[in-house]
Image (cartoon, rainbow, N blue to C red):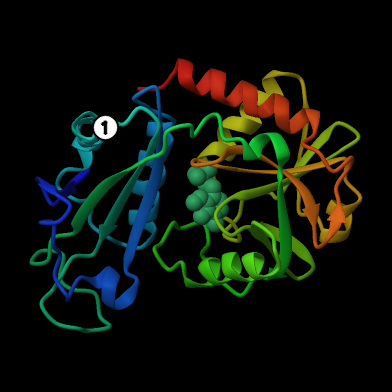
Amino acid sequence: MTRTVYVNGEYLPETEAKVSIFYRAFLMADGVYEVTSVLGGKLIDFEGHQKRLERSLNELDMKKPAAFDNLIEIHRKLVELNGIEEGLIYLQVTRGAPGDRDFAFPDPETTEPTLVLFTQNKPGLADNPTAKTGIKVISIEDIRWGRRDIKTVQLLYPSMGKMMAKKAGCDDAWMVEDGFVTEGTSNNAYIVKDGKIITRNLSTDILHGITRAAVLKFAREAQMVVEERPFTIEEAKEADEAFFTSASAFVMPVVEIDGATIGTGTPGDVAGRLREIYLEESRKVAV
Ligand code: PLP
C-alpha cells in the first residue's frame, strides 16, 4: 500500500513527496526529529514528544515550523489516512532549503523550516514477542557529540553501533563513556539490583527519553525505588535485571550483556511489570 505522507502542509502519496537537494538535513544533518507510537489508533505520550521537539528546536536556534501548533491534527490525520492501528509516526523538522550549501545558518526570515511526517505501520507492536524472551546487547565506546539531549538526525554512529551488535550476533549496543553506560543506540538503559531501578541521570550526555520519564513516574507511583545515577557494564553484568525504554519498544528486557547472562537469563519481573503498567497507563491517556 502506498502511504500518505506529510510534507510542508501537503498530504501526498509517498511516491510524490519530494524535498530539495539543498535540504539542510541532507547536507548538514541540520534537523531534529521525534518518533511517537500509535496504539489502538491513538498517540502515546504525544505531549511529551511535542515539548521535547520544541526544546530541540530552541537549543539549535531553529525556527518552529508554521504548523507547530497543529501537529496533533497532522499526526491524527496521518493515522486516519493510513489506517494505523499500531505503529509509529516519524516527524522531522529541518532548517529548510536555502538554495545553496553554506555552513552558516540561512536567514530564518527567508528560509522556512521544512516539516515532514510519515507513518510506519507495525501491527503487533505492543505484543512484541521479543519482550517475552529479551534481547542481547554489546557495549561499545560512546563517541557521539556532546549534546545528546538534542534529538538530532545525526544518527550515523548509533547506526554503526547497531551494525556492530548485529555482527556480534546481538540486538543492540549500550554505549560507554568514561567507564559508565550512557544509553543504547536508540533507547535509555536501566539495571535492577535488589529491587532498585538504576538509570543514568539526565544531562547533556543522554537523550531525555519521553518513555523514560513516564516509566520512572509509574515506577515511583508503584512504590518502586528509583536511583538516577551512572552505572558501569560490570555493575550491569552483576545486576538482577536489565532493560531499556523507547517510544517504539516501550520497556524491553535485556538478558545478556557482552556475553554475560543477566539474572536468570530470562526477562525479569520488574521489567515485565513496568512494561505492563506503561502500556496500560499510557493507553488510558492516549490521544
Ligand atoms: N536515547 C536515544 C539515543 C534515542 O535515540 C532514543 C529514542 O529514539 C531514546 C533514548 C528513547 O527516547 P524516547 O523514549 O523518547 O523514544
| Side of 139 relative to 285 (left or right) | right
Residue 105 place in picture, x, y as percent: 24, 74
Q: Toward which corner of the image does residue 132 lie, by quadrant?
A: top right
Q: Quadrant of the C terminus?
A: top left
Residue 41 visible (yes or no):
yes
Circle 1 sits in a helix, a strand or a loop, which is it? Answer: helix
Would you place residue 3 above or below residue 279 in this image?
A: below
Q: Nearer the viewer, residue 240 or 16?
A: 16
> Left or right: where does residue 144 sit relative to residue 54?
right
Q: Quadrant of residue 264?
A: top right
- Residue 197, compared with residue 144, is above or below; it is above
Q: Position of residue 244 (x, y in %)?
A: 66, 45
Residue 131: % across, % down: 65, 36
Q: Quadrant of the N terminus?
A: top left
Count the marks. Answer: 1
Q: State whether residue 208 appears in this view.
A: no
Left or right: residue 109 compared with residue 235: left
At horizontal 86% and vertical 31% (from top left) the residue drawn is 195
The amino acid on which the numbered mark 1 sits, given as a three-letter code, is Val
Please give the residue where the numbered disc 1 appears in the rendered image: 79
Is residue 176 shown left or right of residue 88? Answer: right
Name the residue: 57% across, 59% down.
204
Q: Nearer the viewer, residue 180 or 253?
A: 253
Q: Kindly identify the residue that appears in the image at 10 percent across and 64 percent down.
A: 109
Determine if the C-beta at disc 1 is less than 8 A from ligand 1. Answer: no
Please give the name of the residue rendered at 55% of the width and 24% of the height, measured from the top-left corner. Answer: 279
Structural crowding at the residue carrying mark 1, measured as other residues with C-alpha within 10 Å and reported as few (<14), some (14–19) or many (≥20): many
